[in-house]
Image: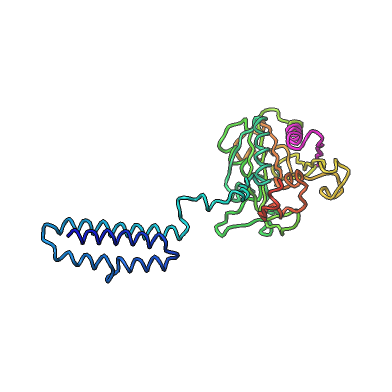
Amino acid sequence: MVKLQHELEDALAQAREALASAANEAGVEECRIRFLGRKGVIPFLMRQMGALSPDERPLMGKTANGVKQGIQAAIDDALARLAGDVSDTSEALDMSLPGRRRTLGHKHPISQVMDDAVAIFRRLGFVVADGPDLETEYYNFDALNTPDDHPSRDIQDTFYLPDGRLLRTQTSPVQIRVMENQEPPVRIICPGRCYRRDTPDATHSMNFHQIEGLYVDKNVSLADLKGVLTVFAHELLGPDVELRFRPHFFPFTEPSIEYDFSCIMCKGKGCSVCKNSGWLEISGAGMVDPAVFAAVGYDPEVWTGFAFGMGVERIAMIRHAISDIRLLYENDVRFLAQF
Ligand code: PHE
């Protein structure tokens, strides 16, 4: 019995030695077969336990199991060592390697303009409102006093769904949704996506962003609109920006204007960003048409207001002298990382 015990312990020591110097996985496998395989050393020794007396057997069984476990652990260690998974990494670590730079992401230029605009209008007392991208004809056109035969309703200009809904062509329907749910005074802005069936080119995209503004109170005048837009332009783009208002037509405002910012690139002298005109068209605005107030149940004799829209892409393009709107949608990190 003592002899068998020694033989088992010897086998463990031999196995450990062999495994510690195994040069590859095949060497480890060879050791496993030699010691633990069916015809290996350990099974051979264990078969000899049959000759032991019944009270010796349990003790020897325990020794044999311990030896088996020891060999298995040595096999696992050897495999881990060969796989490079060594706990002592001092040799594997190359202190001369340069560190890996972690690049920080940042907001997309479109989101930057929207966030900056929201911050500026908040300071002027506006709150952010929201509305759905999928709209009904009622909100996008009817309630905004848009005649049935207005060209913007045309299938050429608007994406319609089979169920008659549409992808909003402007953020103006949010004006209606807000006024339906709120008594005046109202002071909201709504940044959001809009969709039009435009052929993409340097200044057009089928999907773009607007920021809508609506101010309703007593005695609101065009001068208030001009003041708010001027403060906004100066806050966003600097005090040198000039504003220009041109008469225009929108079904939901009367009078209506289009407004331009002077080109911040050339300071109005003319350059490629402003196509040599010195001015950049931002979007439309005007005094809320009484017919719109009537549609939402505000008394047009009591309430007055102005509304404006602004093209977010256009402002981002002016801000960064970007010449092609499509660059804003390609998500090329080399482009976006510049801003
Ligand atoms: N919704 C108009 C457009 O998309 C812009 C606008 C907004 C005009 C609000 C007047 C008032 O062109």
**Is residue 240 part of the magenta span, yes or no?**
yes
Which quadrant holds the N terminus?
bottom left
Disc count in the image? 0
Q: Where, by quadrant of the figure, is residue 41 drawn?
A: bottom left
The reply to whether residue 135 is in sight is no
Q: Give whichever of 106, 18 is nearer the camera.
A: 18
As drawn, is 234 to the left or to the right of 45? right
Which quadrant holds the C terminus?
top right
Q: Which residue in the rendered view is the most extreme toward the top? A: 219
What is the x, y in percent for residue 159? 63, 57
The boundaries of the magenta stretch are 225-246
Q: Which residue in the rendered view is the most extreme toward the front? A: 3
Q: Which residue in the rendered view is the most extreme toward the bottom? A: 39
What is the x, y in percent for residue 204? 73, 54
Q: Which residue in the rendered view is the most extreme toward the left? A: 54
Residue visible at 31% across and 57% down in the picture: 70
Which quadrant of the frame does ligand 1 lie within? top right
Q: Where, by quadrant of the figure, is residue 57 drawn?
A: bottom left
As drawn, is 218 to the left or to the right of 42? right
As drawn, is 22 to the left or to the right of 331? left
Residue visible at 74% across and 31% down in the picture: 224
As drawn, is 107 to the left or to the right of 278? left
What is the x, y in percent for residue 19? 38, 61
Which scheme is used to colour this image of the protein? rainbow
Q: From this view, report whether residue 182 is shown above or below residue 108.
A: above
**Is residue 98 part of the magenta span, yes or no?**
no
Q: From this view, report whether residue 29 is shown above or below residue 97.
A: below
Q: Give whichever of 192, 181 is nearer the camera.
A: 192
Q: From this view, report whether residue 112 is shown above or below residue 55.
A: above
Q: Where, by quadrant of the figure, is residue 299 drawn?
A: top right
